[in-house]
Amino acid sequence: MASSQDITEQATARSGRYRWVIVALLFAATAINYVDRQMIGVLKPTLSAELGWTETDFAQIVFWFQVAYAIGYISFGKIVDLLGARLGYAVAIIIWTLSHMAHGLASSVTSFALARFGLGIGEPGKFPAGIRAVTDWFPQRERAFAIGLFNAGANVGAIITPLLVPFLVLMFDWRAAFYITGVLGVLWLIAWWLIYRHPSEHPRVSPGELAWIQRDPPDPTEAMSWRRLLSVRETWAYALGKFFIDPIWWFFLFWLPGYLFERYHLDLKTFGLPLAAVYLISDFGSIAGGWLSSRLIGRGWPVNRARKFTLFICALCVVPIYFAQSIDNVWTAVLVIGLATAAHQAFSANLYTFPSDVFPRSAVGSVVGIGGTVGAIGGMSMALFTGYILQTTGSYSLLFAICASAYFIALGAVHLLSPKLAPVALR
């Protein structure tokens, strides 16, 4: 039987649900973000044939995107802490939408790299701004689920891209595809600016919902410098977790379309559905991973135990991808790769909650920015390494082996540096 405290908390939580509208906005932005990001991977076979790219050329374009991503991530972490989620997110989507549309003007490896560089500066703003918004709008027990929901937009964007982009290319051309999809960012920016406010200032938030949002003890409001944040182990626990798992997601995002295209002899009309299926499976993982740890916390598990148990389950689910290249049936491969990408998203949803679990609100954006930058540095190395391996061997075996082990290494780093996942006392 539920206690009187549980009944009171449930009634308070149900007294308003406007916070889920904010999650829907963040979900939509994440989907748009991934449409813009993944288009280069979906169009890789087309662009390589038309512009004569080698694997090394493509790796260089991805590399410069990730250089910019590292710069943008750490910059937007601080920007979001200073400006807040509303203005910080607006600045990010303006930069990335203009840069995305600039791809339609590119005609060489250099011009594509410049357009990708601009995209890389703006796109990472969605993470610190999105996590700051969730931190402002949700109590701790709901944050992993909320982050899992909005992060599921990544998979929706990844599902839409291989279905929409080939259609646009066949109807128009690849340049028009960049212009048309860029309009989505403009429409979202208008909706964000009209709808988003801090919950304490929002007319649609009821007193009961606001009380639920603010149920956790108040955080210190003092701004935290990077020097102070870099001196604590918990910052590096999050950053190293990102360093080990982010390159794997970049590999999936940028090289998986080409892998399916080549390994199973697909073309622009036929490889979209298997690729969309992979990310449809991923969507389930993003939501389920956030739900599981939030559910365990709701059942009374300590935050540390709930988060790390979920991370361990996710790491186990990635292991079968080691055998992916030996699978001859495309749909069996889709199931194995989809399980791995779903596990990544579930792992990522829980890792993203780490800054809000242990740091005060005033430091969340900066910690997310530091972690994202370290993850992007890992992604740069993975991009160049992947290009070299594929150019010289043509085999994905070593790359899939790295994927299978990375999540256990990431969990080990998180646990060693933050064994109790205790709140940080920054003096």
Image (tube, grey):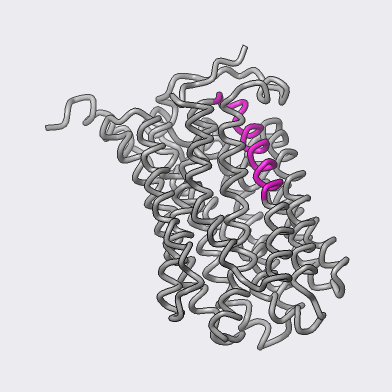
Q: List the single residue furthest toward the left.
A: 1
Across and down, in percent, residue 55 comes to 74, 71
Q: Nearer the viewer, residue 6 or 211?
A: 6
What residue is rendered at 33% in x and 36% in y? 13
Across and down, in percent, residue 1 comes to 11, 32
Q: Is residue 405 magenta?
A: no
Q: Is 422 above or below relative to 294?
A: above
What residue is rendered at 63% in x and 68% in y? 255
Left or right, 38 with respect to 316, comes to: right
Q: Nearer the viewer, residue 398 or 343?
A: 398
Across and down, in percent, residue 211 comes to 40, 27
Q: Is 281 above or below relative to 194?
A: below
Q: Nearer the viewer, residue 392 or 307?
A: 392
What residue is rendered at 52% in x and 73% in y? 275
Q: List the single residue furthest toward the front.
A: 393
Our reading of the magenta stretch's main secondary structure is helix
Across and down, in percent, residue 398 comes to 58, 62
Tag count? 0
Q: Which residues are magenta?
A: 359-378
Which picture quadrant has residue 52? bottom right
Can I make out residue 410 in this image? Answer: yes
Q: Is 175 above or below relative to 197?
A: below
Which picture quadrant has residue 425? top right
Q: Is residue 371 magenta?
A: yes
| Image quarter hosting the C terminus | top right
Which picture quadrant has residue 182? bottom right
What residue is rendered at 79% in x and 62% in y? 60
Can I make out residue 87 in this image? Answer: no
Q: List the single residue furthest toward the top.
A: 427
